[in-house]
């Protein structure tokens, strides 16, 4: 190994002056930068002409070889390979150490290639399934990355550490302690995985969780981000969502709206219902199927309450309020055209027949001087019952 490094010292003799050394170093570094910039295009070019796995191997091998050669050239030009050889001898890195280092490096390279291969497999296998969303495919890919890298690091540690079992036992106890200390965080993360795979809602859905309502913009392992209708972003922990009642208003791609309207007790209910239904059918926001429905809901204090129900598609906050406003305007206009009264809240006062009812009495009293009354007096009207007489 030291003899191989010493061979690069000849470059310092070929380029004896400092400007030449700088020029060669810049060219070597520029070669690395050029390979890094052309890495993706090179990978795509090889993938078009061969298997993607071969493209991964070829592009990775080219990148590693370029970095190794450029580093050796820079060290050789500046005459530092002898110093590197001395450090190699001082640390006693024999053939066994070099072999382990090379094996560890190759294992890490294989791990990178394996993660890319698994990602392509996940995209090809799960990408054709409509039951699996892009977000779930991404989560599956992340989990596969964690598993592959964990196995690879354990193997690398096993190469360099003889008593790996004790280290793993210690790591297990440390994991238990950390799990007990951060059980809230772990519970939130587990709830996040459940949400990602159970799919009670997806990105873009309109949901309501307790007092929070809005459009889902992101689902992570820790929390779910919701954009409220006021334009604010609310971060809801996943464990809160898992333990709360969640309403998904856009799961089926449509939403039913209801507008309540009161009509006078003397109005023909069937006629008012027909007018309201015709008015709703004329607005653009309402779906034709399912058709609008008008139901009599209750006897109000001043009116019979009708429920005007209709559906909208692609529910969102904007479409919700636009459709609701259009429905109220259409029903009000239709009732006004047909002289159907939408009564104000009112109260009816009556006296008991067995007590003689009540009467309105006029009592004349003198008003203070300077009163605007024509005769200097005002009339006070009050209600009296037979008990007052």
Image (spheres, rainbow, N blue to C red):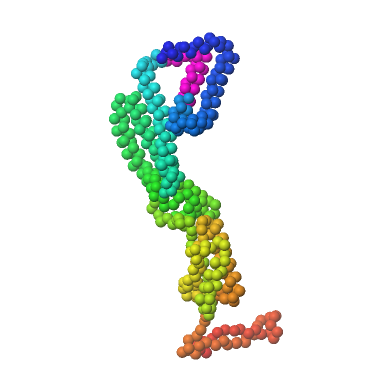
Q: Is residue 175 above or below residue 3?
A: below
Q: Which residues are magenta?
A: 63-87
Q: Taken as a whole, is the magenta stretch helix, strand or loop? A: helix
Residue nearer the viewer, 371 or 93: 93
Does the image show residue 195? no
| Horizontal arrangement in the rendering, residue 78 relative to residue 155 (left or right) | right
Residue 170, position in %: x, y? 31, 33
Residue nearer the viewer, 238 or 27: 27
Seen at 48% across and 25% down, the residue is 63
Seen at 49% across and 90% down, the residue is 356
Q: Is residue 124 above or below residue 370?
A: above
Q: Is residue 60 above or below residue 223?
A: above
Seen at 45% across and 50% down, the residue is 202
| Residue 37 part of the magenta-drawn span | no
Residue 254, position in %: x, y? 48, 58
| Horizontal arrangement in the rendering, residue 122 relative to residue 389 (left or right) | left
Residue nearer the viewer, 163 or 258: 258
Q: How many marks?
A: 0
């Amino acid at each position: 190994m030291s003899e191989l490094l010493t061979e690069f010292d000849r470059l310092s003799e070929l380029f004896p002056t400092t400007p030449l050394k700088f020029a060669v170093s810049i060219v070597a570094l520029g070669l690395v930068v050029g390979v890094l910039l052309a890495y993706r295009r090179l990978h795509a070019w090889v993938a078009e002409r061969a298997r993607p796995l071969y493209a991964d191997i070829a592009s990775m091998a080219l990148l590693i070889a370029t970095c190794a050669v450029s580093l050796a050239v820079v060290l050789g030009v500046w005459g530092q390979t002898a110093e590197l050889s001395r450090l190699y001898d001082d640390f006693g890195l024999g053939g066994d150490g070099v072999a382990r280092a090379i094996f560890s490096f190759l294992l890490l390279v294989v791990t990178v290639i394996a993660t890319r291969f698994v990602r392509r497999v996940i995209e090809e296998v799960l990408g054709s399934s409509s039951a699996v969303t892009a977000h779930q495919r991404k989560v599956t890919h992340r989990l596969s990355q964690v598993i592959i890298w964990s196995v690879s690091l354990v193997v690398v540690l096993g190469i360099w550490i003889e008593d790996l079992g004790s280290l793993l036992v210690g790591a297990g106890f440390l994991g238990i302690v950390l799990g007990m200390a951060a059980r809230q965080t772990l519970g939130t993360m587990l709830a996040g995985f459940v949400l990602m795979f159970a799919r009670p809602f997806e990105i873009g859905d309109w949901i309501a969780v307790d007092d929070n309502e809005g459009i889902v913009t992101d689902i992570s392992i820790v929390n779910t981000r919701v954009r409220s209708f006021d334009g604010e972003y609310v971060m809801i922990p996943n464990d809160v969502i898992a333990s709360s009642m969640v309403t998904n208003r856009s799961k089926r791609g449509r939403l039913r709206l209801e507008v309540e309207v009161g009509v006078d007790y003397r109005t023909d209910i069937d006629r008012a219902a027909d007018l309201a239904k015709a008015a709703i059918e004329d607005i653009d926001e309402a779906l034709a199927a399912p058709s609008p429905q008008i139901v009599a809901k209750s006897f109000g204090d001043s009116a019979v309450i009708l429920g005007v129900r209709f559906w909208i598609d692609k529910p969102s906050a904007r479409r919700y309020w636009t459709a609701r406003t259009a429905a109220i305007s259409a029903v009000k206009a239709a009732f006004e055209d047909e002289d159907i009264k939408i009564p104000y809240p009112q109260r009816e006062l009556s006296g008991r027949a067995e007590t003689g009812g009540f009467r309105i009495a006029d009592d004349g009293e003198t008003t203070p001087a300077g009163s605007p009354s024509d005769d200097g007096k005002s009339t006070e009207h009050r209600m009296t019952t037979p008990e007052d007489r």
